Amino acid sequence: MSGPVTAIHRQVEALRAGREPRLIARLPSGWALLGERQFLRGYALLLPDPVVPTLNALQAPERSRFLLDLARLGDTVLEVTGAVRINYAMLGNLEPALHAHVIPRYAQEPEALRTAHPWAYDWQAGEPFDPATHGQMLAQLRGALERP
């Protein structure tokens, strides 16, 4: 592997080894998992496998597959959580490896945050992922993604 080893690389290794309890599903382009902090219920990520630096590093078929999987994950989060919409983000500035955020948005969010970008939230104040608390939602997301 060339380039920096990022948190994304470490997470993909843990997913491959079956050591990640936040796993929703293995998708054709990578791994869907719930976020470490559920600052908004249903916050999820899509990590490519193999890890690449950016979306632009993928050839057209792989790029299309990743984006289709991202939309499918967003559709599933929308369905399971009852969110109003999904925000998508691919930044890679802090962790220079492709990863996509799937962020459900809700009508009942605090007024000052409802129309703000998701980074206006204090993510560290978000509820940490806990299998006992989030297991049912995880199972619903997994079941919805496994449907044809």
Image: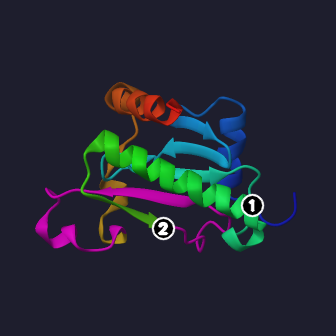
Which x, y percent locates residue 24? 51, 36
**On the image, numbered disc 1 is attached to which residue?**
61
At x 29%, y 43%, the residue is 81
In the image, farthest residue toward the front = 148
Residue 4, magenta (yes or no)? no
Res. 7 in view: no
Res. 33 in view: yes
Amino acid marked by disc 2: Ala
Reply above or below: 96 against 143: below
Which x, y percent locates residue 110? 14, 63
Amino acid marked by disc 1: Pro
Which class describes the residues within 10 Å of circle 2: few (<14), some (14-19), or many (20+)? Answer: few
**On the image, numbered disc 2 is attached to which residue?**
89
In the picture, measured across the screen, residue 12 lies left or right of residue 128, that is right
In the picture, measured across the screen, residue 127 lies left or right of residue 54, that is left
At x 58%, y 34%, the residue is 20
At x 35%, y 26%, the residue is 136
In the rendered structure, which disc, 1 or 2, sits on the residue that comes first in sequence? 1
At x 55%, y 72%, the residue is 91
* Magenta extent: 89-118
Marks 1, 2: nearer the viewer: 1
Considering depth in this image, is 16 or 82 the residue closer to the camera?
A: 82
Residue 144: image quadrant is top left
Task: Say if mark 1 contacts mark 2, CB within 8 Å.
Answer: no
